Image (cartoon, rainbow, N blue to C red):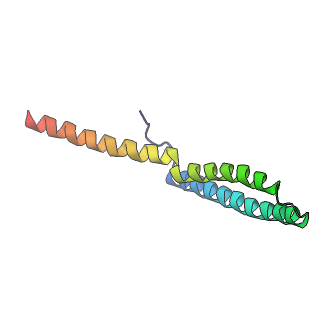
Amino acid sequence: MAKASTTTPQERADKRVKSYTDLMWHIATFVIVNGFLWAIDLMQGRADWAYWITLFWGMALAFHIAAYLLDTDGRQNRRYQEYLTEEQGRANQDSTEI
């Protein structure tokens, strides 16, 4: 069972902003570093090793994006609150029917 949040709205907002900023830095670093690696690879006339770095780093970046979008803690708390409200409504309805 999920617990009620013990953090303040400001703390949750700070966490969300930090998470967003970290994601943006990851994307920027990915683009800059991979662009540099591809430039080196193409100047060598091969274009074969930068592909692998971009592929695997891109998968890691995709997981980072998914983690940011899913935001499990916030989603769980919202779902818990929805179910709790629903169950309280049912309990109130059952008590008035008796």
Camera-nearest residue between 3 and 33: 33
Q: Position of residue 29 (x, y in %)?
A: 75, 60
Residue 89 picture quarter: top left
Residue 34, image x and y in percent?
Answer: 78, 60
Q: Quadrant of residue 93?
A: top left
* Residue 67 higher or lower than 4, as above or below: below
Q: The N terminus is located in which quarter? A: top left
At a point 36% along the width and 44% down the height, the residue shown is 81
Between 77 and 30, which is closer to the camera in this rendering? 30
Residue found at the very far left of the displayed protein: 98
How many numbered marks does the figure carry? 0
Q: Is residue 81 above or below residue 55?
A: above
Q: Residue at x 83, y 60 (%)?
A: 47
Corner quadrant of residue 19? bottom right
13 horizontally vs 77: left or right: right
Residue visible at 34% across and 46% down in the picture: 82
| Residue 54, percent from left and from top | 74, 55
Q: Residue 32, image x and y in percent?
A: 78, 64
Q: Quick one: 72 or 45, which is closer to the camera?
A: 45
The residue positioned 25% from the left and 40% from the top of the image is 88
**Residue lying furthest front:** 46
Query: Relative to residue 47, is residue 80 drawn left or right?
Result: left
Q: Nearer the viewer, residue 20 or 58?
A: 58
From the viewer's perspective, is residue 44 above or below residue 58? below
Left of 96 or right of it: where is 41?
right
Q: Quadrant of the C terminus?
A: top left
